[in-house]
Image (spheres, coloured by chain):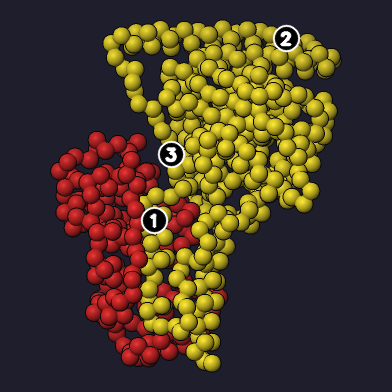
Chain colours: A red, B yellow
């Protein structure tokens, strides 16, 4: 069912490649299309949350719900654009932009204390109390020169994360 | 015959007891970066490891790979071979029809007339089931090579094999009349199950019922203890896998206190993809597909019987046997429970990751306060 590259024309591939800023090679896009079709079991043209969650490795990830809100309803072009941050050809700037988007759940370009607290909650679950989470976050924010009321923007994220070697790459299997 | 595609439910804790620790298989270490020494803002904000894992799973994951069909290239569609192929199909349908006629004309009288003489009836029915299976195999132009010593009929012995399709059972059955444990299916298959397969002594289970497992375990135990019963054949994966991977074995077959005889089955992909993708096609379509392929070629290895070693748990025993079978049949092992096709993984795995990260954050906090 729809998992042959004959469904994707050369023109389609080039369009997708342009949309993701050449993050993936044409072969990789073909592989990603096969994967997309494999995940999109009911053939609706997009992969639903349920279909993503049927991948056990994804379902056990602490950030899966958060990512689902970003992934839900994406068509193939947007799907590839979503994954482009994970390409080895992506710049550090692009990777940090992606991380920023994960934090900035309301999409207004600013990350609040609560946004950061929410992500920390996803990562630590019930194993730290809410109070301790706040405590830790406030402490490290202050040490970095921010306060609880600070609104972080993209440039702040670049400053904080830019220096560490950010490793965020996946390999697209190419037959 | 498709499994219901409703909402996936979180697996009950009962199913958890069935499998060994997944953490033993997955790369060690938390997926969430553990900060060393003093905790910085960067350590808390850097979610790249978790994101990378999620993206990796989206792009490719070992579980979905187990259930991917691999239809062979159509190398035989040309003018010369086509008429030959048509004749082949007709001939095979004929063979199967003849087989059924012979079988039914012998089985029905035997079943009803020899009601009193149980022993003789059992023997004859066994032979007849072997016969109809041979006819089935012939109808797919099956070329099966059996390796290893023919299993001997002894009590307290069960057979386990990897599972690719329901035809696994037929292929093994034509050599030796096994009793099998199967999911009860609707339709004509169910009818066959309740009439003919009853005669070789089969056990039914229902995947969706949790309590069902206890009943089945008891039936398994009873059957394996009985000396007169046909040897029991179990597919511990619990679901069909695509013959290139093997998923976790359920421990039920390994805690019966019996010798376990492993059987490895490998289909030759050039001729047909024998994997029955129950999500994509019904069993009827699957059989038709087999009948219209050129051949079903496979190897069956009867491997050395194994016993539970002292100090070994049933789960370890299951893993050891899975290893033996996977090596023989060239299958890659994955740490997933086949039933994840029908339900979600338990939150336990996510919680373990969360716990590990939480602990390191707390540790970092303590270091600060010193």
Answer with mark 1 or mark 2, whichever residue precedes in sequence: 1
- Visible in this render: residue B215? no
Query: Residue at (61%, 21%) from the top-left corner?
Result: B146
Q: Residues within 10 Å of mark 2 (few under 14, many from 20)?
A: few
Picture quarter with the N terminus of chain A: top left
Q: Secondary structure at mark 3?
A: loop
Q: Are marks 1 and 3 in contact (CB under 8 Å)?
A: no
Answer with mark 3 or mark 2, whichever residue precedes in sequence: 3
Residue on which the image places disc 1: B56
Distance CA(mark 1)–CA(mark 2): 60 Å
Residue on which the image places disc 2: B109
Q: Is residue A6 above or below residue B167?
A: below
Q: Mark 3 — on which chain does it sit?
A: B
Query: Residue at (66%, 16%) from the top-left corner?
Result: B130
Q: Mark 2 — on which chain does it sit?
A: B
Q: Is residue A145 above or below residue B271?
A: below
Residue on which the image places disc 3: B68
């Amino acid at each position: 069912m729809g998992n042959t590259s004959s469904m994707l024309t050369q023109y389609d591939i080039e369009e997708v490649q342009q949309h993701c800023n050449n993050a993936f090679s044409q072969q990789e896009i073909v592989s990603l299309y096969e994967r997309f079709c494999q995940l999109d079991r009911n053939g609706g043209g997009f992969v639903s949350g349920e279909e993503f969650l049927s991948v056990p490795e994804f379902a056990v990830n602490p950030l899966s719900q958060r990512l689902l809100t970003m992934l839900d309803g994406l068509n193939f072009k947007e799907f590839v654009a979503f994954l482009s941050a994970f390409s080895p050809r992506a710049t550090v700037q692009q990777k940090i932009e992606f991380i920023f988007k994960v934090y900035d759940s309301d999409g207004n370009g600013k990350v609040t204390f609560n946004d950061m607290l929410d992500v920390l909650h996803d990562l630590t679950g019930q194993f730290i109390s809410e109070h301790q989470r706040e405590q830790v976050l406030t402490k490290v924010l202050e040490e970095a020169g921010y306060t609880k009321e600070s609104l972080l923007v993209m440039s702040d994220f670049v400053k904080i994360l830019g220096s560490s070697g950010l490793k965020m790459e996946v390999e697209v299997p190419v037959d | 015959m498709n499994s219901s595609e409703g909402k996936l439910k979180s697996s009950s804790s009962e199913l958890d007891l069935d499998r060994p620790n997944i953490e033993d298989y997955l790369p060690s270490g938390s997926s969430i970066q553990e900060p060393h020494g003093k905790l910085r803002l960067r350590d808390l904000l850097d979610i790249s490891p978790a994101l990378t894992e999620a993206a990796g799973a989206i792009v490719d994951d070992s579980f979905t790979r187990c259930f991917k069909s691999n239809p062979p290239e159509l190398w035989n569609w040309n003018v010369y071979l086509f008429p030959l192929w048509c004749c082949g199909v007709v001939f095979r349908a004929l063979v199967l029809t003849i087989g059924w006629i012979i079988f039914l004309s012998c089985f029905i009288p035997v079943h009803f007339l020899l009601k009193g003489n149980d022993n003789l009836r059992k023997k004859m029915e066994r032979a007849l089931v072997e016969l109809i299976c041979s006819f089935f195999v012939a109808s797919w132009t099956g070329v099966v090579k059996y390796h290893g010593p023919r299993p001997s009929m002894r009590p307290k012995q069960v057979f386990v094999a990897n599972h690719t399709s329901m035809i696994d059972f037929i292929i093994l059955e034509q050599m030796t009349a096994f009793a099998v444990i199967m999911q009860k299916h609707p339709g004509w298959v169910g009818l066959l199950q309740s009439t003919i397969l009853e005669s070789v002594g089969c056990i039914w289970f229902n995947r969706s019922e949790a309590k069902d497992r206890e009943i089945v375990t008891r039936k398994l135990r009873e059957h394996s203890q009985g000396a007169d019963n046909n040897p029991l054949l179990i597919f511990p994966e619990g679901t069909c896998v695509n013959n290139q991977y093997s998923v976790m074995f359920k421990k039920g077959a390994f805690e019966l206190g019996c010798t376990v005889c492993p059987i490895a089955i490998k289909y030759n992909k050039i001729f047909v993809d024998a994997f029955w993708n129950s999500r994509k096609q019904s069993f009827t379509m699957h059989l038709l597909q087999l009948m219209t392929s050129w051949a079903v070629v496979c190897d069956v290895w009867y491997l050395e019987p194994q016993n539970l070693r002292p100090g070994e748990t049933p789960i370890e025993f299951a893993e050891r046997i899975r290893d033996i079978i996977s090596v023989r049949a060239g299958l890659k092992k994955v740490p997933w429970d086949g039933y994840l096709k029908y339900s979600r993984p338990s939150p336990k795995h996510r919680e373990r990751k969360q716990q590990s990260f939480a602990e390191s954050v707390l540790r970092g906090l303590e270091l600060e306060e010193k």
